[in-house]
Amino acid sequence: MERIALQPGYTISRVIKGGWHLAGGHGTISEEQALADMRHFVKAGITTFDCADIYTGVEELIGKFRKKYEAEFRSGELSPLQIHTKYVPDYKVLATLKKEDTIRIIDRSLKRLGVERLDLVQFAWWDYQFPKYLETAVHLSELQKSGKIRFLGVTNFDTKRIQEILDAGVTIASNQVQYSVLDHRVEKNMTALAQKHHIPYLCYGTVAGGFLSDRYLNAPDPVPPYENRSLTKYRLIIDEFGGYELFQEALRTLKRISDQYAVGIAEVACKYILQKPMVGGVIVGARNRNHLDKLKKLDSFTLTRHDLVKIEAIVSRSKGPNGPFYELERDKTGKHGSIMKYNLNED
């Protein structure tokens, strides 16, 4: 599996195993099966895992995985893991958050994962009307200097606030963003900032919760309630893109390209983003090992300029989503923000 130096001395697999699908709202999880599947991902070269303090049970699950296969990691039979978590303070504490609160949550992540230092902490903030995000970023930087955190990243911040954090003297190693055939908001002004300060993207939503796949090609528009929270979220993005019919045209375009390389629509959708400027990796929410054979094929092809022109022709007809990155989702009263859960970080 292809790897990349996210920062000097720190390499990750460009396909990152997402953890959201192992949290609540995505069906029943067998712990034994999940741990066995994690081992298969690592053996396949997907050694970088993404999780969060608010993904219920996922940090603990990865910690159990590390412990269960500790001997294999120590012997080198399993390659070293890179574990990326997030720090997402609850909405209700944003106005009063103190450094002690941040230390407590970071210490909890260390304990859950069973590590002495967190590889990458990706900082998120629900609402800019509470200005403590800047102070909290500095607190995280201090924890980094103390040795509890190796690298600091951000997730779901807009360009303006990222610049503020940089101006406060905080070094940002990565930026987790939603980026896909259906969502190009980061290209408006964020990529220029990323290039200037070398802040690679770690991209989620690249297959739109599974919508960008052969399963939905020529399929009728699914009717709510959807199977899981991911489909609920990304069906809204399809509406922003231009609706289900334009989405089907995009799938047909991706299908014609995928047939050339004997891969699926999802693999072309991932490769399209992997070939974008400043993209370090794509986070794929593969719940189990059944996806591995397809993911391995990502190293087998490269999209040509002709392929990219075909995809861009569809993208150019999209209506959105528009505005600064994550602005739609940040509106708690809007259709995107109203489906979010804002207070999941309680002990």
Image (cartoon, rainbow, N blue to C red):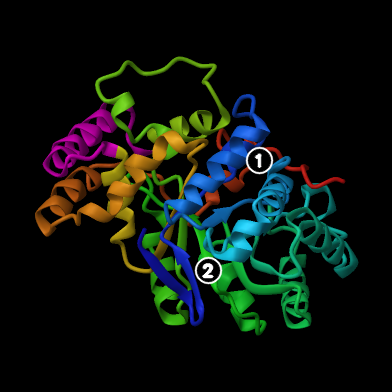
Residue bearing the label numbered 1: 332
Magenta-drawn stretch, dominant element (helix, strand or loop): helix
Query: Quick check: 27 above or below 242?
Result: above
Residue 340 in the image: state x and y as whole percent.
65, 38
| Relative to 250, 215 lies left or right | right
The quarter holding residue 116 reads bottom right
Q: Nearer the viewer, residue 98 or 240?
A: 98
The quarter holding residue 196 reads bottom left
Q: Helix, strand, or loop for circle 2?
A: strand
Inspect the magenta stretch and tell me whether residue 309 lies in it: no
Q: Can residue 337 be seen at all in this image of the molecule?
A: no
Three-letter amino acid code of the residue under disc 1: Lys
Inspect the magenta stretch and tell me whether residue 264 lies in it: yes
Residue bearing the label numbered 2: 174
Three-letter amino acid code of the residue under disc 2: Ser
User: Residue at 64% of width from left, 52% of height from top?
Assistant: 69
Query: Which of marks 2 and 1 precedes in the sequence?
Result: 2
Q: Can residue 262 be seen at all in this image of the molecule?
A: yes
